[in-house]
Image (tube, rainbow, N blue to C red):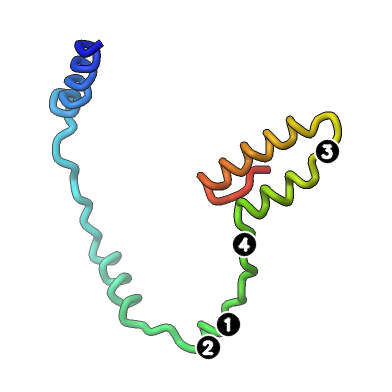
Amino acid sequence: MMICVSVMLAVFLGWPLAFGGGEATVLQPSRAEARTVAVAATVPATAAAVQATPATPKAESCYKRYQREVRQCSGGAGAACRLKQADHWDMCEATGFWPE
């Protein structure tokens, strides 16, 4: 068992060295991109622009949605429905949205 783990670790650590996993290249922004970023950083947000943004409704948490969906499960397929909602809750916690 330990031999297998040691070989796997050696392959995992040696693979980038053998097959080109050297230094990552750092991409430099072009002059136009740098100028755009510099201009955007110097322009302050106006009060009118801040007030013009609509207020978004507060999103429902994954657990609250799970509770609401489980309350709707009933009948002979109740256990399967609860299991499906538990899977959806898990996906919501992982991705940030409730699967359809």
Residue 59's mark? 4
State how far apart marks 2 and 3 are (Cα): 50 Å
- Residue 51 is situated, as x and y percent measured from the top left of the image, at 56, 85
As displayed, is residue 27 above or below residue 13?
Answer: below
Between the C-alphas of marks 2 and 4, the distance is 25 Å
Q: CA distance from mark 3 to mark 4?
A: 26 Å
Q: N-terminal of the two: label 2 or label 4?
A: 2
Q: Tell me how far mark 1 sits from mark 4, CA to CA.
A: 20 Å
Q: Secondary structure at mark 4?
A: loop
Which residue is located at x 67 percent, y 52 percent?
65
Instruction: State the separation of the CA atoms marked 3 and 1.
Output: 45 Å
Q: Are marks 1 and 4 in contact (CB under 8 Å)?
A: no
Q: Which residue is mark 1?
A: 52
- Residue position marked by numbered label 3 in the rendering: 74
- The residue that mark 2 highlights is 48
Please report whichever mark, 3 or 1, sits nearer to the chain's N-terminal start.
Answer: 1
Q: Residue at horizontal 61%, vertical 76%?
A: 54
Specify whether 69 is left or right of 93.
right
Asked if marks 1 and 2 touch (Cβ < 8 Å), the reply is: yes
Q: Earlier in the sequence, mark 2 or mark 3?
A: 2
Q: Quadrant of the C terminus?
A: top right
Residue 62: percent from left, percent from top? 61, 52
Which quadrant, please, contains the N terminus?
top left
Give left or right: position of 87 versus 37: right
Check disc 1 and report its element: helix, strand or loop.
helix
Q: For the residue labelled by badge 2, is the local secondary structure a helix, a strand or a loop?
A: helix
